[in-house]
Image (tube, rainbow, N blue to C red):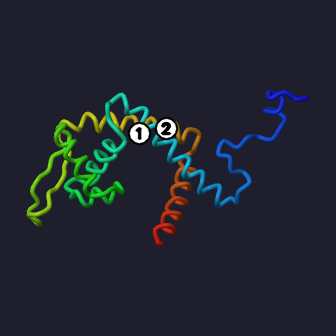
Amino acid sequence: MASDADNKTTGPQKDPFGIRDESPRRQVGLRMTVIARLQRNSFDRKVSALNVTRSQWAMIAIVSRYPGSTQRTIAEYLEMSEASAGRLIDRLCADGLLERRDRRDDRRARAVYLTEKAEPLLAKLGTIASESEQRMFSGFSDEELEQLLNFMDRIYENVSRG
Protein backbone atom coordinates (compact mmCIF):
# COMPACT_ATOMS: atom_id res chain seq x y z
CA MET A 1 0.00 0.00 0.00
CA ALA A 2 1.40 3.44 -0.95
CA SER A 3 2.05 5.92 1.81
CA ASP A 4 0.94 9.56 1.75
CA ALA A 5 4.51 10.54 0.96
CA ASP A 6 4.46 8.28 -2.13
CA ASN A 7 1.16 9.80 -3.31
CA LYS A 8 2.62 13.29 -3.15
CA THR A 9 5.27 12.45 -5.69
CA THR A 10 3.49 9.96 -7.91
CA GLY A 11 -0.23 10.68 -7.50
CA PRO A 12 -2.26 13.52 -8.93
CA GLN A 13 -1.27 16.98 -7.74
CA LYS A 14 -3.67 18.38 -5.16
CA ASP A 15 -5.26 21.63 -6.25
CA PRO A 16 -4.85 24.20 -3.44
CA PHE A 17 -8.07 25.83 -4.65
CA GLY A 18 -10.03 22.56 -4.76
CA ILE A 19 -11.60 23.47 -8.11
CA ARG A 20 -9.79 21.47 -10.81
CA ASP A 21 -13.02 19.80 -11.95
CA GLU A 22 -14.60 23.14 -12.86
CA SER A 23 -14.52 24.93 -16.23
CA PRO A 24 -11.57 27.27 -16.85
CA ARG A 25 -13.87 30.30 -16.48
CA ARG A 26 -15.14 29.05 -13.13
CA GLN A 27 -11.59 28.24 -12.01
CA VAL A 28 -10.37 31.75 -12.84
CA GLY A 29 -13.30 33.42 -11.09
CA LEU A 30 -12.93 31.30 -7.97
CA ARG A 31 -9.16 31.76 -7.89
CA MET A 32 -9.52 35.54 -8.13
CA THR A 33 -11.84 35.44 -5.13
CA VAL A 34 -9.54 33.18 -3.10
CA ILE A 35 -6.41 35.18 -3.95
CA ALA A 36 -8.10 38.47 -3.00
CA ARG A 37 -9.17 36.98 0.35
CA LEU A 38 -5.68 35.59 1.03
CA GLN A 39 -4.10 38.96 0.22
CA ARG A 40 -6.51 40.87 2.49
CA ASN A 41 -6.00 38.42 5.35
CA SER A 42 -2.22 38.53 4.99
CA PHE A 43 -2.26 42.34 4.91
CA ASP A 44 -4.55 42.41 7.96
CA ARG A 45 -2.11 40.23 9.91
CA LYS A 46 0.82 42.44 8.99
CA VAL A 47 -0.89 45.72 9.84
CA SER A 48 -2.31 44.42 13.11
CA ALA A 49 1.06 45.35 14.68
CA LEU A 50 0.16 48.95 13.81
CA ASN A 51 -3.14 48.60 15.73
CA VAL A 52 -5.16 49.26 12.58
CA THR A 53 -8.22 47.29 11.50
CA ARG A 54 -9.14 46.46 7.91
CA SER A 55 -11.87 49.09 7.83
CA GLN A 56 -9.49 51.70 9.27
CA TRP A 57 -6.66 51.04 6.80
CA ALA A 58 -9.14 50.90 3.93
CA MET A 59 -10.63 54.26 4.99
CA ILE A 60 -7.17 55.83 5.28
CA ALA A 61 -6.21 54.49 1.85
CA ILE A 62 -9.40 55.82 0.22
CA VAL A 63 -9.07 59.27 1.80
CA SER A 64 -5.42 59.34 0.73
CA ARG A 65 -6.39 58.49 -2.86
CA TYR A 66 -9.40 60.83 -2.96
CA PRO A 67 -8.71 63.72 -0.57
CA GLY A 68 -11.65 66.04 -0.03
CA SER A 69 -14.25 63.34 -0.66
CA THR A 70 -17.53 63.44 1.18
CA GLN A 71 -18.68 60.80 3.63
CA ARG A 72 -21.19 59.57 1.04
CA THR A 73 -18.50 59.12 -1.64
CA ILE A 74 -16.16 57.38 0.79
CA ALA A 75 -18.97 55.03 1.83
CA GLU A 76 -19.56 54.14 -1.83
CA TYR A 77 -15.85 53.41 -2.40
CA LEU A 78 -15.75 51.19 0.70
CA GLU A 79 -19.11 49.56 -0.05
CA MET A 80 -20.52 50.37 3.36
CA SER A 81 -23.44 52.36 4.64
CA GLU A 82 -23.05 56.08 4.98
CA ALA A 83 -23.75 55.79 8.71
CA SER A 84 -20.98 53.20 9.15
CA ALA A 85 -18.56 55.36 7.18
CA GLY A 86 -19.53 58.32 9.35
CA ARG A 87 -18.80 56.43 12.56
CA LEU A 88 -15.45 55.28 11.20
CA ILE A 89 -14.56 58.80 10.08
CA ASP A 90 -15.54 60.09 13.54
CA ARG A 91 -13.27 57.51 15.16
CA LEU A 92 -10.31 58.34 12.92
CA CYS A 93 -10.92 62.07 13.46
CA ALA A 94 -10.88 61.47 17.23
CA ASP A 95 -7.58 59.60 16.78
CA GLY A 96 -6.23 62.61 14.88
CA LEU A 97 -5.75 60.72 11.59
CA LEU A 98 -8.56 62.37 9.59
CA GLU A 99 -10.23 65.74 9.64
CA ARG A 100 -13.46 67.12 8.27
CA ARG A 101 -13.48 70.50 6.56
CA ASP A 102 -16.28 72.67 5.26
CA ARG A 103 -16.79 72.68 1.50
CA ARG A 104 -17.19 75.94 -0.36
CA ASP A 105 -19.45 74.39 -3.01
CA ASP A 106 -21.90 72.74 -0.58
CA ARG A 107 -22.41 74.02 2.96
CA ARG A 108 -24.22 70.82 3.98
CA ALA A 109 -21.41 68.45 2.99
CA ARG A 110 -18.04 68.17 4.69
CA ALA A 111 -14.84 67.12 2.98
CA VAL A 112 -12.56 64.50 4.60
CA TYR A 113 -8.76 64.76 4.55
CA LEU A 114 -5.79 62.99 6.10
CA THR A 115 -3.93 64.85 8.81
CA GLU A 116 -0.17 65.12 9.16
CA LYS A 117 -0.42 62.56 11.95
CA ALA A 118 -1.67 60.00 9.41
CA GLU A 119 1.33 60.37 7.09
CA PRO A 120 3.72 58.04 8.99
CA LEU A 121 0.98 55.40 9.25
CA LEU A 122 0.22 55.76 5.55
CA ALA A 123 3.93 55.30 4.78
CA LYS A 124 4.05 52.10 6.88
CA LEU A 125 0.91 50.80 5.17
CA GLY A 126 2.55 51.56 1.81
CA THR A 127 5.68 49.64 2.80
CA ILE A 128 3.64 46.62 3.86
CA ALA A 129 1.65 46.81 0.60
CA SER A 130 4.88 46.97 -1.46
CA GLU A 131 6.31 43.95 0.36
CA SER A 132 3.07 42.05 -0.24
CA GLU A 133 3.15 42.94 -3.94
CA GLN A 134 6.78 41.83 -4.21
CA ARG A 135 5.87 38.44 -2.76
CA MET A 136 2.69 38.08 -4.81
CA PHE A 137 4.38 38.84 -8.13
CA SER A 138 7.70 37.14 -7.47
CA GLY A 139 8.95 35.47 -10.65
CA PHE A 140 6.76 37.55 -12.98
CA SER A 141 8.41 39.58 -15.73
CA ASP A 142 7.31 43.14 -16.47
CA GLU A 143 5.79 41.85 -19.72
CA GLU A 144 3.77 39.22 -17.86
CA LEU A 145 2.51 41.79 -15.37
CA GLU A 146 1.51 44.11 -18.21
CA GLN A 147 -0.35 41.24 -19.90
CA LEU A 148 -2.09 40.35 -16.62
CA LEU A 149 -3.05 43.98 -16.13
CA ASN A 150 -4.55 44.09 -19.62
CA PHE A 151 -6.52 40.90 -18.94
CA MET A 152 -7.79 42.29 -15.65
CA ASP A 153 -8.82 45.55 -17.34
CA ARG A 154 -10.84 43.52 -19.84
CA ILE A 155 -12.47 41.53 -17.05
CA TYR A 156 -13.29 44.75 -15.21
CA GLU A 157 -14.90 46.22 -18.33
CA ASN A 158 -16.99 43.08 -18.81
CA VAL A 159 -18.12 42.99 -15.18
CA SER A 160 -18.77 46.70 -14.85
CA ARG A 161 -21.12 46.73 -17.83
CA GLY A 162 -23.55 44.90 -15.87
**Circle nearer the N terminus (2, 1):** 1
Q: CA distance from mark 2 to mark 1?
A: 9 Å
Q: Is residue 71 left or right of residue 148?
A: left
Q: Where is residue 62 drawn, in percent x and y?
A: 30, 51
> What secondary structure is found at the residue carrying circle 2?
helix
Residue 95 in which image quadrant? top left
Residue 140 in which image quadrant? top right
Q: Where is residue 33 drawn, in percent x and y?
A: 54, 51
Residue 111, disc: none
Residue at the location (41% across, 37% down)?
A: 44
Mark 2 residue type:
Gln
Q: Nearer the viewer, residue 40 or 127?
A: 40
Residue 129, disc: 1
Residue at the location (53% across, 40% down)?
A: 136
Q: Which residue is mark 2?
A: 134
Which residue is the extreme one toward the right?
1
For the image, the number of numbered tags is 2
Foreground label between 2 and 1: 1
Q: Residues within 10 Å of mark 2 (few under 14, many from 20)?
A: few
Q: Residues within 10 Å of mark 1 (few under 14, many from 20)?
A: some
Mark 1 residue type:
Ala
Residue at the location (33% across, 42% down)?
A: 57
Residue at the location (31% across, 46% down)?
A: 61
Q: Where is residue 24 drawn, in percent x and y?
A: 68, 59
**Quadrant the N terminus occupies:** top right
